[in-house]
């Protein structure tokens, strides 16, 4: 019986230590939340923090791609940034900043689809490092796809 009492005392101490640890962790998280909430309140008072501004689309800087088809605009973006490889986000941003017009309800989805199809046709290539973001680029003039030379 004494053995069981000792075991139960050990368990009680273990659970009490766990409760204390969790209470300390909870208090630390509450402190962090309080700091973040205070920062948000201060930023709102200063007028710096407007939720809508976080999701604004980039300002149009030029009409470079206005009236262009998506394929032509994508190729122009990739040509003008060679030899750099560009992610979908960068291509999307460039389209918007340079006045690309689309009647699409979801331009980003259409861009993914177009890039996939252009890659399938061998018009552009992509690369992805382990776990990284897929980046697109135009093949070099000398590169061959399926035995056919790609010319520009």
Image: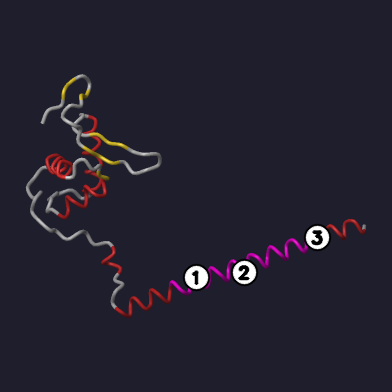
What is the image's colouring? secondary structure
| 98 versus 39 height, above or below | above
Q: Which residue is mark 2?
A: 24
> Residue at the spot x=71%, y=64% of the render?
17
Q: Residues within 10 Å of mark 1 (few under 14, many from 20)?
A: few
**Closer to us: 106 or 59:** 59
> Residue at the spot x=24%, y=30% of the render?
120
Question: How far apart are labels 1 and 3 at the CA level?
Answer: 33 Å
Q: Earlier in the sequence, mark 2 or mark 1?
A: 2
Q: Quadrant of residue 126?
A: top left
Q: Residues within 10 Å of mark 3 (few under 14, many from 20)?
A: few
List x then y, in percent, for residue 19.
Answer: 68, 65
Q: Secondary structure at mark 3?
A: helix
Side of 93 relative to 39 (left or right): left
- Magenta region, residue range: 8-36
Q: Which mark is residue 32?
A: 1
Question: How far apart are labels 3 and 2 at the CA level?
Answer: 21 Å
| 134 versus 36 height, above or below | above
Q: Which mark is residue 10?
A: 3
The reply to whether the C-beta atoms of the residues labelled 1 and 3 are less than 8 Å apart is no
């Amino acid at each position: 019986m004494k053995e069981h009492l000792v075991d139960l005392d050990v368990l009680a101490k273990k659970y009490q230590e766990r409760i204390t640890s969790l209470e300390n962790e909870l208090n630390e998280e509450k402190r962090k939340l309080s700091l973040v909430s205070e920062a948000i309140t201060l930023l709102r008072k200063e007028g710096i923090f407007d939720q809508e501004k976080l999701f604004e689309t980039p300002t149009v800087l030029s009409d470079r791609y206005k009236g262009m088809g998506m394929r032509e605009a994508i190729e122009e973006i990739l040509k003008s940034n060679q030899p750099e490889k560009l992610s979908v986000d960068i291509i999307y941003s460039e389209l918007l900043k340079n006045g690309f017009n689309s009647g699409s309800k979801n331009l980003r989805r259409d861009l993914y689809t177009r890039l996939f199809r252009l890659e399938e046709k061998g018009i552009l290539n992509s690369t992805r490092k382990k776990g990284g973001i897929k980046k697109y680029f135009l093949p070099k003039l000398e590169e061959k796809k399926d035995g056919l030379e790609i010319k520009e």
